[in-house]
Image (spheres, helix red, strand yellow):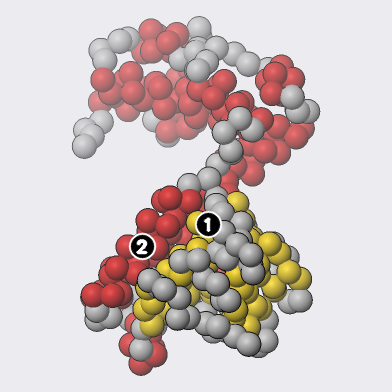
Amino acid sequence: MERREGFEHQRLCVVPRPAVAEALAQPVTRRLVVTDAGWFPRAWGHLRARPHGAEEAVVIVCVAGVGWVDVDGVRVRVTPSTVALLPPHAPHAYGADVDDPWTIWWCHVRGSDLADLWSAMGAGRDRPVVSLRAVDRASALLDEIVSALERDQSPARLLAVSGIAWRLLTQLAVDRRLPEQGAPLERAMRYLEERVDGDIRVADLARLVGVSASHLGALFREATGGGVLAYHTGLRMARARGLLDTTALPVTEVAREVGYPDPLYFSRQFRRVHGLSPTAYRGQRKG
């Protein structure tokens, strides 16, 4: 038997469907609108089944206890510091563990940009549960959403909540892409950040963090969109911009500070990244 709500100290907000329809017809909220949101603490007996799916996508952040989600007949365990992402129209069910029921923040969302956000989060029917690096940030944003909807569900409030929801979903996407503390990718990134002015061979860096060069390259491409050397070059260019903006160092000295003994090569690299020379960049008005 389903138990959808009725948990002690719960918080629950349901936006009237005419208000949702109106929001989906407006220029901004049609991209993303929150239709329902809440907080269920120690939700003993919680069970929800939608054999035909739902119009909305469902986001469930588990902060304590244990639960499960079932998408297309495949059940996955949900533990603290994970998020369950259930896409629209997918048959699904979810519920709390009998012995250690979950505490969850959750929301339902619709909108034209949802498919792109879902893709950025790496969510899919075959991978409905994703680990979180910053569960406190995610739960804080859901708290903001619930608190706002508890005040009212006016068009202005729904617009504000759409912004918070966008931040929530992009935060979840960032959590997926950024490496965990101590992981090979995180150690490699930290090593490069600490050696902006030095040269590095990819094979040496891979050996240092305990993976193959090809695997390290794949990790960097997934996380940053480019390879190891492109990431290191980006760090060098960021440092160069800072020196050009905040010091009077000659371009030759800036080049040396960021690991380029040949100032002409540095200038070519800088122009390739920024579209103008270091001198021209320094002369631009900023701020």
Number of numbered markers: 2
Looking at the rendered structure, the kind of residue marked 2 is Asp
Determine crowd level at label 2: few under 14, some 14-19, many 20+ residues with C-alpha closer than 10 A: some
* Residue linked to disc 2: 143
Give x and y (percent) for residue 211: 75, 28
Along the viewing direction, whichever of 112 and 149 lies nearer the viewer: 149
Picture quarter with the N terminus? bottom right
Left or right, residue 65 beside residue 236: right
Above or below — where is 271 with respect to 62? Answer: above
Above or below — where is 193 with respect to 81? Answer: above
Whether residue 163 is visible here, answered yes or no, is: no
Above or below — where is 28 with respect to 236? Answer: below
* Residue linked to disc 1: 64
Mark number displayed over residue 199: none
- Tell me if label 1 and label 2 are in contact, CB under 8 Å: no
Determine crowd level at label 1: few under 14, some 14-19, many 20+ residues with C-alpha closer than 10 A: some
Left or right, residue 21 beside residue 44: left
Along the viewing direction, whichever of 194 and 139 lies nearer the viewer: 139
Give x and y (percent) for residue 101: 57, 66
Looking at the rendered structure, the kind of residue marked 1 is Ala
Residue lying at 26% horizontally and 15% vertically, measured from the top left = 247
Q: CA distance from mark 1 to mark 2?
A: 15 Å
Along the viewing direction, whichever of 220 and 186 lies nearer the viewer: 186
Under circle 2, the secondary element is helix
Along the viewing direction, whichever of 158 and 48 lies nearer the viewer: 48
Give x and y (percent) for residue 156: 23, 75
Residue lying at 58% horizontally and 38% vertically, measured from the top left = 180
Whether residue 249 is visible here, answered yes or no, is: yes
Residue lying at 60% horizontally and 51% vertically, measured from the top left = 131
Under circle 1, the secondary element is strand
Q: Nearer the viewer's eye, disc 1 or disc 2?
A: 1
Above or below — where is 219 with respect to 208? Answer: below
